[in-house]
Image (cartoon, rainbow, N blue to C red):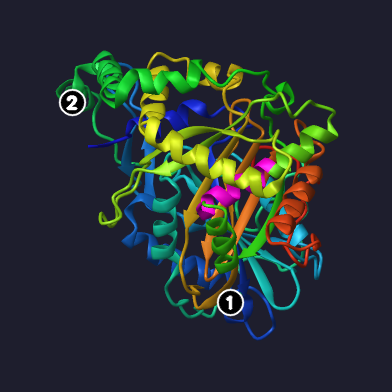
Amino acid sequence: MDRLRSADVINLAAEAPGVPMHMTVVAVLDGAALCDSAGRLRLDAIRRTVSAGVEAVPRLRQVLHEPGRFAGRPLWVDAASFDVVKHVGRIGVPSSSGEDALLEVAARVLVRPLDRRRPLWRMVFVTGLGDHRIGLIVVVHHVVADGLAATALLLSLLDRPLLPDDGRAPVAPEAPVAPEASGTPVAAGEPVAAGEPVARPGWGALVLDNARGGFGNARHALASVRHVRAAGIRAALRPMVARAPGPRPASLNRPVGPHRGVGVVRFDLAEAARVAHAHGGTVNDLVLGLTSGGLRALLVERGEDVGRLVVTASVAVSLRDRGRDGDVGNRTGAYLVDLPVGVRDPGERLRCVAARTAAVKAAQPSSAATAFLAVLSRVGVARWFSVHQHLVHVVESDLTGPTGPVTVFGAPVLGLIPIGSLAGNVPVSVLALSYAGRLVVAIQTDTDAVPDADTLLDGLRAEWAALRGTNDSRPGAVGAGSLGKRSEGGAG
């Protein structure tokens, strides 16, 4: 039986109403190959291609089954049927709207709950962007896979030729789709329907499997405790209870709600690596340094004494064996690093980040935090902890994407934008992705908790301009998308 791992269970435990644990990738496509001679999206052909493709990607047609008391952890079961219409849709925006409109749509789509009665993913094509461009928003529940595994899953599904049209009329109108009353757009042709039929194991078989695997939840909890001890319980707890002295910025720990803003900055990957190495760090250190500069600008604008504050980032690290092709689920750890927001000089700030990350990587077992959270989820307090903690103020992750250009059903991918998840009381996430010689950094915020997020983005731009030795902090030097606009969430 394919049961969830501890890291998968954590992602379920962190989810709350209006705060789904979703990972999102936004792609900008050269849409010529996806449209018919009249310029209309070939949605029927796309759906047929996706439907054929999921046969080769089993996880994308499986449903999460929560078996109940004494039957152990949730597990993946095959859906008895798969209706692609419920997973692939279209949203129209006003003509030539551009990237800002695409990001606003993405901010709404990513908070729409995924129906747990169906496979936990959604794909929405966005038309009307202009210049023959089409947006693609793919949302995958974090319980399905971590960032690296999700990238591999999506590439295996999308990197295939588009099947020919079957001669039928288009399945959806090409007019812009109006939002629902909640403010959330609905993809054309995506009706509200019952969940997928599934083939579930019997309760008795699940209980026996659970007993064989660990004598129930008590055994799982003890195993998680042993995991923490094996990783070094003192090392695991020290960063959580014995942080550097100094006050924490309370304004960066506010409950996350359903409203999102997304901003994007872009860099030449080779130049980013050169700047990072010149300051003794890695590209991920550079992202953390830029984040430090952005948060410093935000806190200064709020009137906080940055010289005294301790601002801590939770930095994700992959525990995945890259040689294990097809391995899905979550295999990630994390370490905590204090960001030097009190340091004035950007170059010194980046050197300080590089030194601190090297030190914490040597001192903190990367699997310990996951094991600690697994214990909390076993005893039912993980969500309470995530809402009340004051140890972490921003989450950051860095993913390595394709080194060369890729296609979606034959359409060239012009750009990729990764968007992480927000949970608990940490309303800022930073997710970086390299793709075809570019480094893309997406900053997601809760717009109620961080209404001044544009200040963060401006500070990050200024930080990059200073590090690369120029005074040019215009969007042309660092491409940027809108961050501060409010996007309403709601059920779809």
Q: Secondary structure at mark 1?
A: helix
Residue at mark 2 to residue at mark 1: CA–CA distance: 47 Å
Q: Which of the pair 393/491 is nearer the observer? A: 393
Q: Was residue 285 drawn as part of the magenta stretch in this picture?
A: yes
**Which label is found at residue 213?**
2
Q: Was residue 40 drawn as part of the magenta stretch in this picture?
A: no
Task: Tell me, yes or no, if residue 122 can be seen here.
Answer: no
**Mark 2–mark 1 CB contact (< 8 Å):** no
Q: Identify the magenta region.
A: 281-292
Task: Tell me, yes or no, if residue 293 can be seen here.
Answer: yes
Q: In the rendered image, which residue does mark 1 sit on?
A: 34
Q: Which of the pair 17/353 is nearer the observer? A: 353
Q: Position of residue 187 (x, y in %)?
A: 65, 55
Q: Position of residue 135 (x, y in %)?
A: 65, 65
Which amino acid, mark 1?
Answer: Leu
In this rendering, is residue 190 above or below 455?
below
